[in-house]
Image (spheres, grey):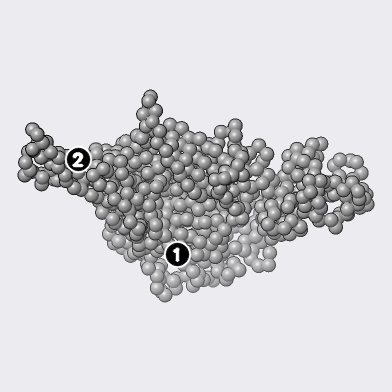
Amino acid sequence: MAYGLAIDGFSFNYGTYSVVATGTVTTGIQTFVSKSAHPDLSDLKVVFIPIGVRSPGDEEVRPVVIENSYALYADSPNNMSPHKYLVLGR
Amino acid sequence: MSYGIKTFDDDGYVNLHSDYSSLVYVGEFTKITNPVRPVYEGEFSIAILDYNKVNNYDQGWLVQYEFEFDTDNLIPFYRPNFDGQEIGIVDVVNEGNTWIINALFKGDAGNFPRFFAFAPLTDIPTVTLSDNGLAVYDEDSQLVFTDSQPPLRIDDVLTVQHPTNIRTASRGTCGRDGTNCHVNFTSDQTTTHTGTVNNTNSKIYHVVPSAYGGLAFDNDGTFERSCGLFGWGDRKYAWAYRSWSSFRGTMVHPYGTAEHTTGWLGDFSGALYQQKSGSCGYGGFLGALIGIAAVVFTGGIGLALVGGALTGFVVGELTSPTAPGLKAYENDEVFDQNSSYELLVTDATYYDIDAANGIDNSINYADLTYYYNTNPKTYWKNSSVEFVSGTNIATTIEIYWNGALVNDGTTVGEFSTSFTAGNGDTYIRGALEDTDVTTTYNSLIGNFLTFADKYKIARVAYGQEPSGGASDDDDDDSDSNVPSDIPELYAGVDGYKAGSFSNTTAWITYWSGSASSTSGTNTNNFIIYNGQFVFFDFNNATTGTSTTSVTANDGRTYYRGASHPEDGNPYTGFNNGYSYTFFGVGRE
């Protein structure tokens, strides 16, 4: 291998995402992750994982992420079904 | 960071950082329900046959998976069952250590996708470290990296979104004769997102679509017929028709492309027809009749009718609290389609999932060519016989290649998508091309329908090798002389080593003398193809190693393919003073 980390035959030179933060998205509360708190990471993504059945009859929706140059915000509308979030970074 | 470790990948991104936990593969979900395609079967319902579910309501299969694992956070990935399969994660449910996935997929019931779980290493209670290697801990002494559990490899990442509409084309109409009528709700709206890495059959995907919605159709009317003495009276009639298809957001990842397409697939449908009549009279109560019909459709269809439907079609399967929520639609609606969300792509082979669970990498699906021809017959035909009630009677599979019924005498499973014939050739079912529907009357059982679904078909010749190069995990084909448009075969030489030509396809070079060199004296070549000895150079038994193509006894040209050192090149096991090297072979 031309670059990266070689460990006893395991070549770790590929791209990946590490877990920066996890938590539960709370309805009506905006969760945010400041980019300045993670200066070594240049690419942050938020993945929302449902943790309960979504009711289309109640028109439930998923949370959304809003990003600006300073932070990532997990927006949680009132008719949101339960979700967890994972902030991934590389 | 003032201490710890940090490494980078070739794109300049951090791929290991001692402040952050890696994501690791922790296991595969188990399918715990049979796939179902629910339809409303309550009061005033009209039959929705399997054919209608596919062609009118665009319905996929709902199925549930379970994975027991002690983690607070889990990211599911799925592997499509076939090229171009439409899949959507509907729900993920977490109850203690139990994780449930409700998924929707297209295809036959047996084409359910597989789901794999990834979790933060810091969430895993017990991790077995290698005897030697590297383990990294964060400042709280939590394990964040170990070479014994390789971190998730990201092959591609995209932010995707669903189209605004489900269908824009006309859906047709159903009217007074609506007791056996269905409009067309099939979705025609997609959005394609292009990544950087091609899809293959070993790629797995994480995405949880947000969009859902439904299409609905209704129609009603009145008419009257003469009645009473001499037909002087009038009898008023009111009728009404309603149907719907509920949709979920899904995705498709076609092999051989870097495209990922968001679209829609139905999860629940229904159709109702009601007709009421008044007494024979002279008008005056038409409004009341219309009201009688209308109450069926406005009296809480969303809850009452869905509940009734569930007991009818999925008893014991999807009636648990973790079953997906289903909705009957009275109007066209779309929800949550404006959200953007992440699509993560990785490769199952990287986590040894292939070895443990049989992911087949022997066929390069990207290079397959699918054919469809009615004369000579070249297609995969799935014939199913159903009563008009929708009850399935029987299903038969016929696989034709160039006019020959290649599965003659062999039963092929209803949900199979590939078949390997006795000669080792494998046939792969492609996209649906045509459907014939015939109605037959039988005096004993009444009317029954025969659906003949004809699919495109591809053939992989016996022993056909995947393509590959020196830098791939695949076989190294860089020394092959077989033209790229000809399949290269190598079925191994175990049969030949055992003294038989059967099960052998190879170009074999042998020589006498030193086994340490690649050739000695009296070097010659012969070819065994599909168990038949097709070439030996009797006239000049010194064709040598420079010969890379020959014309065989059958008049066809054969090319020497890639070397197969795994079979011992040079092989001296015959103890006859000769050394052997084994190559693949291609036939023009």
The image position of residue B67, as x and y in percent, is 46, 44
Q: Amino acid at mark 2?
A: Gln
The image position of residue B89, as x and y in percent, is 42, 51
What element does badge 2 sit on?
A: strand
Which residue does the numbered mark 2 point to in the structure image?
A: B275
Q: Nearer the viewer, mark 1 or mark 2?
A: 2
Which residue does the numbered mark 1 point to in the structure image?
A: B159
Q: Nearer the viewer, residue B288 or B296?
A: B288
Q: From this viewpoint, which residue is outermost toward the top?
A: B444
Q: Earlier in the sequence, mark 1 or mark 2?
A: 1
The image position of residue B322, as x and y in percent, is 36, 44
What residue sits 27% from the left and 59% below the top?
A78
What element does badge 1 sit on?
A: strand
Give the crowd class for mark 2: few <14, some 14-19, many >=20 residues within 10 Å: some
Task: Indicate whether B25 appears above or below B411.
Answer: below
Q: Nearer the viewer, residue A81 or B566?
A: B566
Task: Indicate whether B448 appears above or below B217.
Answer: above
What residue sits 53% from the left and 37% below the top?
B397
